[in-house]
């Protein structure tokens, strides 16, 4: 049973309890009116005394039912407020998840866009390198091992180690 169904059920029960309380109070007032009428008569008939005792018994029973109904109404109101609080919490969690989802979708879009730009840049760089004349004729041995190590260290993040690099080393 969902929280909304529980809330609706609690509201229905509360309405029923309230109508029962109103009905019992009306019946109590009628019985008290009959009691006052009977007490105002100068002569008390045995049937009236018996009815009065029955009425008193009914009044006590109804008062017990009213008290029980009022307790039930209080419990239902507490359950209703707790259910509303839970609904509010769930709506907040849903909103948070929706916001995070939108942020992630934005990050995905930016990542895809950046990847495309990087691919285009690499392709242009390769085209530019292939268009450079005489690059293939440069002997590889002209580059010293030290220079290759420095370039490799730079591209692998070793340049961030905090060591000072002089211009002469480059």
Image (spheres, grey):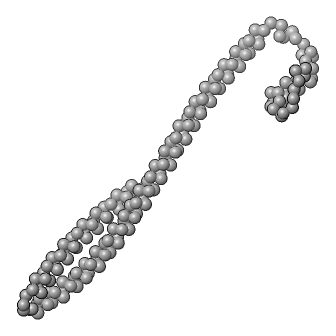
Instruction: Please say if 136 is above or below 34.
Output: above
Give percent across and percent down for residue 62. Answer: 25, 78
Whether residue 73 sits left or right of residue 42 in the image: it is right
Q: Residue shown at 90%/22% (left/top)?
A: 169
Q: Residue furthest top?
A: 133
* Marker count (numbered): 0
Instruction: Please say if 158 is above or below 143.
Output: below
Whether residue 164 sits left or right of residue 9 in the image: it is right
Whether residue 44 sits left or right of residue 18 in the image: it is left
Q: Residue shown at 37%/58% (left/top)?
A: 7
Q: Residue shown at 62%/30% (left/top)?
A: 111
Q: Residue shown at 75%/8% (left/top)?
A: 131
Q: Is residue 147 visible?
A: no
- Name which quarter of the figure residue 167 lies in: top right
Q: Nearer the viewer, residue 168 or 65?
A: 168
Give percent across and percent down for residue 166. Answer: 88, 24
Give percent across and percent down for residue 115. Answer: 65, 26
Q: Nearer the viewer, residue 162 or 23?
A: 162
Give percent across and percent down for residue 82. Answer: 43, 60
Q: Quadrant of the N terminus?
A: bottom left
Q: Is residue 151 visible?
A: yes
Instruction: Please say if 142 is above or below 39.
Output: above
- Name which quarter of the figure residue 10 lies in: bottom left
Q: Quadrant of the C terminus?
A: top right
């Amino acid at each position: 049973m969902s929280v909304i169904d529980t809330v609706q059920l609690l509201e229905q029960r509360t309405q029923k309890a309230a109508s029962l309380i109103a009905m019992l109070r009306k019946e109590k007032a009628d019985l008290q009116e009959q009691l006052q009428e009977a007490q105002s008569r100068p002569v008390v008939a045995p049937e009236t005394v018996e009815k009065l005792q029955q009425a008193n018994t009914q009044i006590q029973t109804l008062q017990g039912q009213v008290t029980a109904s009022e307790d039930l109404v209080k419990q239902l109101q507490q359950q209703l407020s707790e259910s509303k609080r839970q609904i509010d919490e769930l709506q907040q969690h849903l909103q948070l998840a929706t916001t995070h989802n939108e942020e992630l979708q934005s990050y995905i879009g930016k990542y895809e866009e950046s990847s495309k730009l990087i691919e285009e840049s690499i392709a242009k760089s390769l085209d530019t390198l292939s268009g450079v004349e005489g690059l293939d004729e440069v002997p590889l041995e002209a580059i010293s091992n030290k220079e290759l190590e420095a370039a490799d260290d730079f591209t692998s993040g070793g340049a961030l180690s905090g060591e000072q690099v002089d211009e002469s080393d480059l």
